[in-house]
Structures are given as structure tokens and as C-alpha cells.
Amino acid sequence: MTLFTKSAVFSAVQAALLGATLGFSPVLLAQESDKDPAAEEKKLEKITITAQRRSQSIQEVPISVATLSGEKFDSIFVSGDDITALAIKVPGLYAESSNGRAAPRFYIRGLGNTDFDLAASQPVSIVMDDVVMENVILKSFPLFDVQQVEVIRGPQGTLFGRNTTAGIIKFDSVKPRQDFDAYLKTTAGTLGTAHFEGAVGGGLTDSLSARASFLSQHRSNWIDNSFTGQNDVMGGYDERAGRLQFLYENEQFDALFQVHSRNYDGTSTMFRKNILSPGSNKLNQNYDRDVVAYDAPGNNVQRYDAWGSSLKFDFHLDGMTLTSISAIEKAAGGGIGDIDGGNPDQAGAAAVPNAVTEDQLKDLKQVTQEIRLASDTSTALSWQVGAFYFDSSFGVNTIDGFFGATEVFHGNTSWALFGQTSYQVNDKLTLTGGLRYTDDEKTFSVGQQNVDGFALVIGAAQIQQYDPIKVRDDQISWELSANYRLTNSTSVFGRVAEGFRAQTIQGRDVAFEAPPSVAGAETITSFEVGTKSDLLDNTLRLNAALFYYTIDDIQLSAIGGQTQGNQLINADKGTGYGFEVDFDYRVLPNLSFGGGFSYNNTEL
């Protein structure tokens, strides 16, 4: 059976005007140089990434990585889209959501998770400013004032830990600096869409700098509810977010403090019934983009609030750097979804309870601490070691039209020790290896649980009692890679890595009169080879990779059981293979094109 098969040409080739005008740079008479200034301006800039937890050129890292600069990012999100706008903008990456502008789901190289539960576990990790965003609501934090996006493909368990079997999407905000800078931009569109974004920053003293940035987005309601006769009552949203940063720098250490917040008030995803033609995926005449027939109260309202803070220290020691990252994230909110798509069409149809689901996230709290000690890269041997701690707790209230309200509680504690070393054998060959030990524990318990509404009618009311659940697992993740420089501008690499996704508990089942489902840990072994090139006098960057992986005990969501509910299962085994290509070409000093292509085939 095919789990996921995708062949995609990324035809959205990006063109970026890098200056306001096309021009030339005259040679100063006092300057003597054999280099043509125009040719130098045409060369592509060096891209620095932190896919291995240290600053390196993307061309030197033996991993398949795609990046989006701040300029490219702005061109994608200029209309105020949420994080799922990244879908198909990077080869091999896909994103979606069935919860409006919240709880996104990501896929890399065909691996992802369709689970829409508020406690869902995903194989694609989201890292924002060096802090993992584990819960699906944290993953949807608005994106603004972004310096760079890195899409790191394949398992990254050694340095980034569990739940990275497919890869990582890493976002880095623009950091404070001594030079003053500021910007303000706005866009407007149909349906009352308005997008405002801005930032201001600069030095406060010789060693202290600050930066404040904000985002405000609005779209008016534009969908009519034909069941109630109300016009323009759904589809809109208001989103506000902000970030404040302080950076202190001296010869002994750097300290970066950040605090951020989000307020979202909008509409959940629109569910529509009977809009597909039988035997096809084509929309039929019942489909009207601007109209739904919702018999549930609240018109699919959705609201979330979140805030977080982090403190990062970099201590500059003799030939080493000691890094500490402490962070806390909190969130709460919820939404309503009329999942049957409306009321019965036929006159006189039997009355049934509304197929409406309301999920409320209560008191999410995530605390993380990471400590790393890393050598510099001035010698042939470089290394880093570290420790990581994670603790998360939250509750979920589920209310639906068939059964009563249910309250469940989730807890997760994890810790890890890790290390990585690289050795430059000669001026052409570099070998890298890494190892990580992770201990992960999850807990689950049921709080309030109401009686089955149907059972009350037929006189068979009873409450199912479910014992608390605790699951624990420990795993070792590892990687080995080699990078060989063929010429000054072309290198090849090979990498083999093993990672895992921790066990998962889904409590949503309890709300539908079924026991909670538990999926054990999944493990992946990945092989990839690739090449990285800077061609045509550094005006063309061409990177490509081939990959193959096997995944054991893959976690999936399945519909079944006595209640035909959504449950977690472990499939036996899956395999996948494919390739991806990324390129950037600087045609003129102020004009460049970029694009990519990917193919993946995944089966179980």
C-alpha cells in the first residue's frame, strides 16, 4: 500500500530584484585591482547556516539544506499568509492545516503526520530562534522580521533530538545590532485584508543594543451562513504579535534576551459537505466559496493567545564557546469546528445532534534548557558536547455534539546528552560523527468526563473509567558523514543517520467513548549522497541530493474501532527514496533567479 507518493516540479521560480535600480560601479582611480567590480557584484553571496549548531557555509555542511533569505521570505509572505505558505516553496517541503491559522502540519521527503489533535506529535520539528516549538499551537506562531529560514532535510536527531525523523524548519529573527535601522511596510488586498509589519533597533550603549518588532494582520469576514441567514460572519481574522530583544556584548560573553507574544482571533477551517463529484476530486455545482450552511453555534470561532521568553548566553573561553539557552513558552485558546459541513438538505430529515467539535487548549507550559560546549574550528579537529532538558504540560477540553465534555491532561519530560566531532583529514576530506542519548517520558490522565448523550436517551448511561497512562522510552540517535572537495567550487558528500520520534498518546479518543490510543516510538535510518557547487564564476549555486530511508514502527493516524474514531497506530515498516535539487542564479548584479525540484516516493 502506498502511504505517500509525490512528484513535484517547483515551478514557482523566484526572481528577486536586489536593488532599486540596475546600475554599475565605477572603478576608483586610486584603487588598483585585477578584479572587475561588476563581475564581483554579480557573484552570489555566501550563505551561512547553523544546521550543525555552529555558523558554517551552506556549501561546507554535509546535509541537504535549503534556505530562504529575508528578502525571499518577505516575497512569499507579503500578503499576510500564515506559516503554511511555505508549502511547495522549498523542494520536498509541504505544509497544511485543518485548524485555520493554527496547528499546522509539515511534511519533508514524504514524511509527516495527518493527526489534527492538539497533542499531536510530528516528525518535522520547528525551531524558532534556537528554541524548539513542540506543541502544534506553538508551531503556528506568526512569522515576521525574519532573517533567514533553513529547511534541514532528513533525520537530525544528533544535535536537535527527538521528533526530527523527517527534518527541521529553522527560523531566525533579525537580531539587535549597534547600527540604527527601522522599517515599516503595509499591504492591502481584497476581503478587507490588511498587513502591517515593522521594526526598530539600534545601540543603547556601546555594549547594549535592542530591537522591537511587531505584526498586525486583518481580514474581514466574507463567508455567509445560509442556515442562519447571516451574511459575512466567517472567514476573517485579526492577528497581532510582537517581539522585543536585548543583546549585550563584550569580550567575555554575549547575552541575548527575547520576549514575544501573540493574540489571534479568527475562524477555524471551513468544512463543506457534498461538494465533490462522485468518483473524482472535482468540485460540483453545490460548491460556493462564499457560502456555507452551518447549524452549529459560534460560526466556527477560533482564539489563541501565546507568549514566550528566552535567554541565551555565549561565554567566550580559550578556544571554546559555552552556550546556554533557557526558554519558556505558554499558550491557551481553542476553536469550534462544524465538521459535518452543515445541516441536512432534505426537508423533514431526522434531527440529529450537531457534528460540532470544540477543542480548548488549557495552560500549555513548555520549559527547555540547553547547554553546549563547542570548540572553535581553527584546527583540524572540532567538536561539541551538550545536554538538553524539556518539560511540557497542558490540558485539552473537548466538547462535541454527540457526546459530553471531556478534559484530559498531557505531560512530557525528556532529557538528552549529545556530542559531535569533525576531523579534517586533509584539505579535501572532512569526516563527521555524532551521538545522542535521549530519555523520554509521557503521562496522560482523564479529568472531567461527561456521559454519552445517546446513552442518556436510551437509558444506558455510564461513564468509562480510564486509568492514568505513563510511557517511557530511551533511544540512541547517531550520524556519520563525509564531505570531499573535488575542486575549490564543487564538493560531494555522503551521510547516514538514525533518529526517532518519541512515543505518543492521543487523548481525543476518550471524548468519543473510546480508550486513549498509544503509539510506540518510530525509528528511521536514512542514507543520502549529494553534491554542492558554485559554478560560472560563483554566479550559479547548484546543490542536489539523493536519499533513501527505512522507517520502523511508523506512527500513523487511522479511522476505525467501534466508534470509527481517529486513533494512533504503529505500522510495521516504511521505505522512501527520492531526490531534490536547489539552485540560485545571479543574472545581473541586481537580479537573481532561484528554484528547485524534488521527487519522493514513500511506501509502507
Image: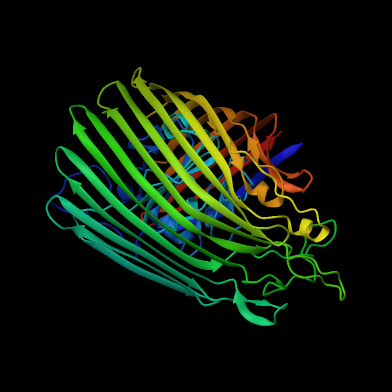
- Residue in front for this viewpoint, 301 or 322: 301
* Residue in the image at 14% along x and 39% along y: 251
**Residue 197: which quarter of the image?**
bottom left
Q: Which residue is drawn at 77% across and 48% down?
A: 564
Residue 567: percent from the left, percent from the top? 69, 43
Give residue 286's quadrant in the image: bottom right
Q: Is residue 337 left or right of residue 372?
A: right
Is residue 564 or residue 589 the one in the foreground?
Answer: 564
Residue 66 x, y percent position in the rendering: 47, 43
In the image, taking residue 354 as reference, residue 119 lies left or right, namely left
Q: In the image shown, does 454 or 295 lie closer to the viewer?
A: 454
Residue at horizontal 21 percent and vertical 42 percent from the top? 254
Quadrant housing residue 483? top left
Q: Which residue lies furthest to the top in this view?
A: 425
Indicate the position of residue 471 as horizontal and vertical percent values. 56, 32
Count of numbered tags: 0
Q: Residue 38: x, y in percent?
A: 31, 51
Q: In this view, does 90 lie above or below 347?
A: above
> Which residue corresponds to the image point at 45% horizontal and 55% vertical from the top-left?
331
Q: In this view, does 187 lie to the left or right of 272?
A: left
Tell me if 155 is positioned left or right of 244 in this view. Answer: right
- Quadrant of the image for the N terminus? top right
Q: Looking at the image, can residue 497 be seen?
A: no
Name the quadrant of the C terminus.
Answer: top right
| Vertical position of residue 489 compared to residue 134: above or below | above
Whether residue 553 is visible here, answered yes or no, is yes
